[in-house]
Amino acid sequence: METKVRYAIEKYGMLKEGDTAVVGLSGGADSCALLLALLALKDSLGINIEACHINHNLRGEESDGDELFVRTLCAERGVPLTVFSIDVRGAAQKHESTEETARKLRYEKFAEMCRNGRKLATAHTASDNAETVLMNMIRGTGTKGLAGIPPVRDMFIRPVIFCTREDTEEYCRQNGIEFVTDSSNLSDDYTRNRIRHKLIPLLEEFNPSFIAAVTRMTEAVGDDSAFLDEYSEQAAQKCVLKNGYDSRKLKELAPAILFRIIARELKDNGVEPTRLRVGQCSHIIEKGMGKVNLCKNKFALVRKKIFYVDTQIQHYRERS
């Protein structure tokens, strides 16, 4: 397992000598294995290791037991630990699920831990990655969805992305760690759990190495997607103007490149870049003129051979 972790770190440049990796430590097999593997590689990589635990206070005594387990594990191995206790139910917004609220608050705390250039190492595995790809396919997805969980995103790194859940559990057993199990992971109330417990075992009947196959696919698609993103950035710079983009130059680009440029522009302006919205923008670029109502008070326009996103309709009138 340590070989797979080192490969991921080196392939994606996750850590360099002198860096501090903060492990998001839940107490489960995946995060415990991540902590142990990084500790084993610590000296050869020249890195520092800390840990962070989030008590979501959703499972009563079980949540408190997980926290105690993590405190004990870190104390025994001399790992500096920061614990956050959050009130997920009290913080939940209207129309927001408990799961969504927990994830939002968790990542807010993780961001606090990443000040001063520290990296937050999360324990997403190849098994998690396969589940994510299947979820994306069920909902409908493009290249980024098929690429699965990004190994690196801003200050977040995923060193066990090439390890399966079986790898992490076996590694814990080899190191004499009795990891904890979140009871919510056993329920089929969540889509991810149904995919984990029902769909993946069925797919493994067709290919026992299904998760390894998905890992190879996401690695290849991720490399391709990263190249296209970089190429798109270069192409965008050649089209950029003071108030937007030269729509004539955009029109000449390959669809995959134009899609990425439009999607990035929408996202930068606070608009979810759905395929429908990007397609509508592509249409007015092809026509050489037009306006798309993206959402309330946000419009994409091609005017005077310039493509841009505006937030007030009066600006459209002024420019016209």
Image: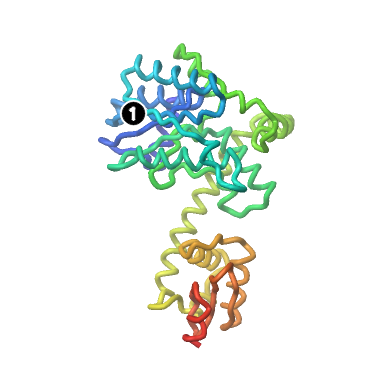
Return the x and y of residue 278 as percentages of the image width and height.
59, 67
Q: Give the labeled residue for mark 1.
A: 50
Total labels drawn: 1
**Measuring 53% from the left and 63% from the top, which residue is drawn there?**
271
Element type where label 1 sits in the image? strand
The amino acid beneath tag 1 is Glu
Residue 205 as seen in the image, left or right of residue 297:
right
Q: Is residue 266 above or below residue 246?
A: above
Choose between 303 and 231: the one closer to the eye. 303
Residue 179 as seen in the image, left or right of residue 206:
left
Residue 139 as seen in the image, left or right of residue 220:
right
Q: Residue furthest left?
A: 18
Colouring chosen for the image of the structure: rainbow
Q: Residue 274 falls in which quadrant of the image?
A: bottom right
**Measuring 50% from the left and 31% from the top, which residue is drawn there?**
56
Q: Is residue 258 above or below residue 154?
A: below
Choose between 29 and 225: the one closer to the eye. 29
Return the x and y of residue 204 as percentages of the image width and height.
70, 31
Q: Residue furthest front?
A: 90
